[in-house]
Amino acid sequence: MDYNYNGPEWQQDNHGNPERSPYPPQYQQPDSQVVLREVTQRNENKFAVTTLVLGIVALLFFWFPILSFILGVIGMIMAIISLIKEEHRVMAIVGLILSMIGLALSSLMTLGYIVEYLTYYG
């Protein structure tokens, strides 16, 4: 490796005019043409992933009935939208099922809280 490089050297461009190269002589830019390809974006199921996450959170936090009820309803609505709009439906169906289970458990917890309140204070 040559460590005695003293800066850019003069080169001629295509029209014979001198120009300075920003690269050392051993690292000259190749004269190849850059080909740009359009990269297609992957079809992501954003609603389905959101539905799945909301269903999991609603199922995990069922002992907070208000939070779980809200997340379960939002998860069910987004699952229906995902089933209508998107192609891959497995995550949306799993999210819908988890949201429904979380909603059912939060309803049972709410019913349990009401029964406990009426038993002890009613």
Image (cartoon, grey):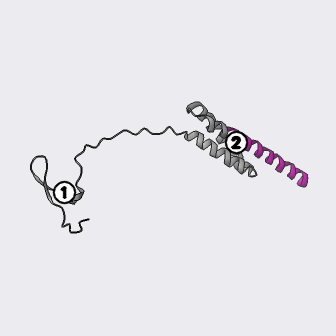
Q: Quadrant of residue 84?
A: top right
Magenta region, residue range: 96-122
Instruction: Indicate the position of residue 107 as horizontal and vertical percent values.
Output: 78, 44
For image coordinates 67% across by 39% down, the residue present is: 94
Q: Residue 51 in the image: x percent, y percent?
A: 62, 41
Nearer-the-camera pick, 3 or 62: 3
Q: Which mark is residue 21?
A: 1
Let me know if residue 103 is in the magenta part: yes
**Is residue 58 found left or right of 31 in the rendered image?**
right
Quadrant showing the N terminus: bottom left
Amino acid found under the numbered disc labelled 1: Ser
Q: Position of residue 93 (x, y in %)?
A: 65, 36
Up-down relation of residue 42 to residue 61 (above or below): above
Q: Which mark is residue 98?
A: 2
From the viewer's perspective, is the residue at label 2 or at label 1 nearer?
Answer: 1
Closer to us: 122 or 74: 74
> Quick check: 38 above or below 114?
above
Residue name at image x 57 percent, y 39 percent: 47
Earlier in the chain: of badge 2 and badge 1, it is 1
Q: Which residue is pictured at 80% across the width and 48% down the height?
A: 109
Quadrant of the rendered structure where residue 38 is?
top left
Q: Is 6 in front, or is 81?
A: 6
Examine the rendering and report whether any part of residue 22 can be seen.
Answer: no
Per the model, the C-alpha gap separating discs 2 and 1 is 62 Å
Callout 2: SS: helix
The residue carrying pointer 2 sits among few (fewer than 14), some (14 to 19) or many (20 or more) residues within 10 Å by Cα, namely many
